[in-house]
Amino acid sequence: MGLNFDITAATPILKNRYTDKKIETLAFSSPTLAKFPKKTDGGGLQYVGAIRNAVTSAVSASDTIAFTTGSASVYQQWQCPWKYAYASGNLTGAAIDQANGDMDSLVESMTSEFDGMFIALGIHAGAALFGNGGGAIGQLNGGAVAALTVTLLNPSLIVNFYVGQLIQASFDDGTGGGGTRSAGATQTLTGVDVNLGTLTAASNWSTAIAAIGVSDFLFNQGDYNAKFAGLAGWIPDTAHRANLNVAFNNVVRSTDPVRLAGVAYNGKGAPKSETFIQTAALVGRMGGKPDLLVTNPLDYADVVKELSTRVIYTTEQAFANPDIGFPGVKVATQYGNITIVADPFCPQGNAWLLTTATWLLISMGKLPKVLGAGIDGQEWLRNAGADSYQLRGAYRATTYCTAPGHNGSMLF
């Protein structure tokens, strides 16, 4: 190719490299995201589904009573809005020239940049899957913000952050409608310490975001109240169930909190394996058949050590993609075999026990996907005003649960 980059000739390189399965391999760093049942033919203004949370009350030992009194079954209609995410990969003219006609070098430059784009979309979706729809990816721990470095309240959420990321802040978690601080001002990360849970920037946080508070929630730029509802939204833990009287996806859940918002159990510091078994019992009581326990890697280690010889090590495959596998353990319980997996996006101290058959991750096309391929065929774009070419990726998706009461959340 040398000095003349042929967009048409470059397209087959993308098609050969970025098959649907290859994109999923890059994006699905979250085992939960990988295993979630998926439906890719979504459309319309939103995804609508109805569940029955109460059967007919027209039942009696007396026929005259059963046939003349009571009401029909009670249904709830979930209205799940689509949420969007976008990312781009850019190849500069300088990189093209530096390849100097070396096809292998050019392909390496292309794939390195575009691999990162799909990985970024995977991080975005993985964080969303454990959120409540508000978009927050962390919260400050109350320390000084007139400083270059701040610390997360829950250090395990550091996996949601990376160098170069643009961060916004708010006093609420994205569901309160307060908006972002200082008219959406951003701070750019220059350092991330995974072990300490700290975020470093080139300037004081209170300089870049003047109104930032010491306990503010943090957001990837543009994500405030803009992500699909994840597990924390559908199955809130015991610390976040006070607002069940506020409509969630068009349903007020306080009328039947367990059937409509799942089982919630607080282990209060008990052995984590005991909290898991107790939650399984409560989910089983509701008719659920839990088959997947999702934990933070540090909590996973504790649970597996406590269960010790009761576990069988296994490798779990992604939904409809055998090329992706994750390590886990299986435990035989009276409620059936339950697989336990460690997910880096699951906050430490939280865990969810899922009946996976009740879940759907619905998207408009693949999640994620290359934009342009199915419309005008122009996957590559020449950037206006810059010596570079761009590939754009995205996902448009939402989540849906047919039976929240067959799932549980727990606090360790």
Image (cartoon, rainbow, N blue to C red):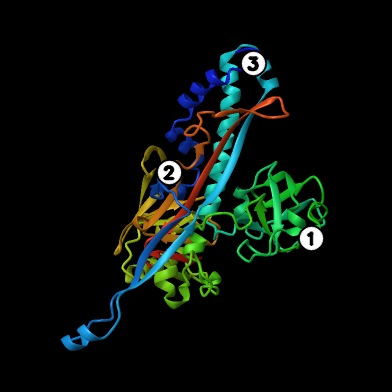
* First of labels 3, 1 by sequence position: 3
Q: CA distance from mark 2 to mark 3?
A: 37 Å
At a point 68% along the width and 21% down the height, the residue shown is 93
At a point 18% along the width and 88% down the height, the residue shown is 64
Query: Is 300 above or below relative to 58?
Result: above
Query: Is 266 above or below relative to 164?
Result: below
| Residue bearing mark 2 | 326
Q: Residues within 10 Å of mark 2 (few under 14, many from 20)?
A: some
Q: Quadrant of residue 289?
A: bottom left
Q: CA distance from mark 3 to mark 1?
A: 46 Å
Q: Are marks 3 and 1 in contact (CB under 8 Å)?
A: no
How far from the left and from the top, in percent, is residue 323?
Answer: 39, 36
| Residue bearing mark 3 | 99
Q: Mark 1 or 2, which is nearer the eye?
A: 1
How far from the left and from the top, in percent, is residue 383?
Answer: 67, 29
* First of labels 2, 3 by sequence position: 3
- Report helix, strand or loop for mark 3: helix
Amino acid of disc 2: Phe
How far from the left and from the top, in percent, is residue 23?
Answer: 48, 35
- Report helix, strand or loop for mark 1: loop
| Residue bearing mark 1 | 211
How far from the left and from the top, in percent, is residue 45?
Answer: 48, 54
The one nearer the camera, 3 or 316, is: 3
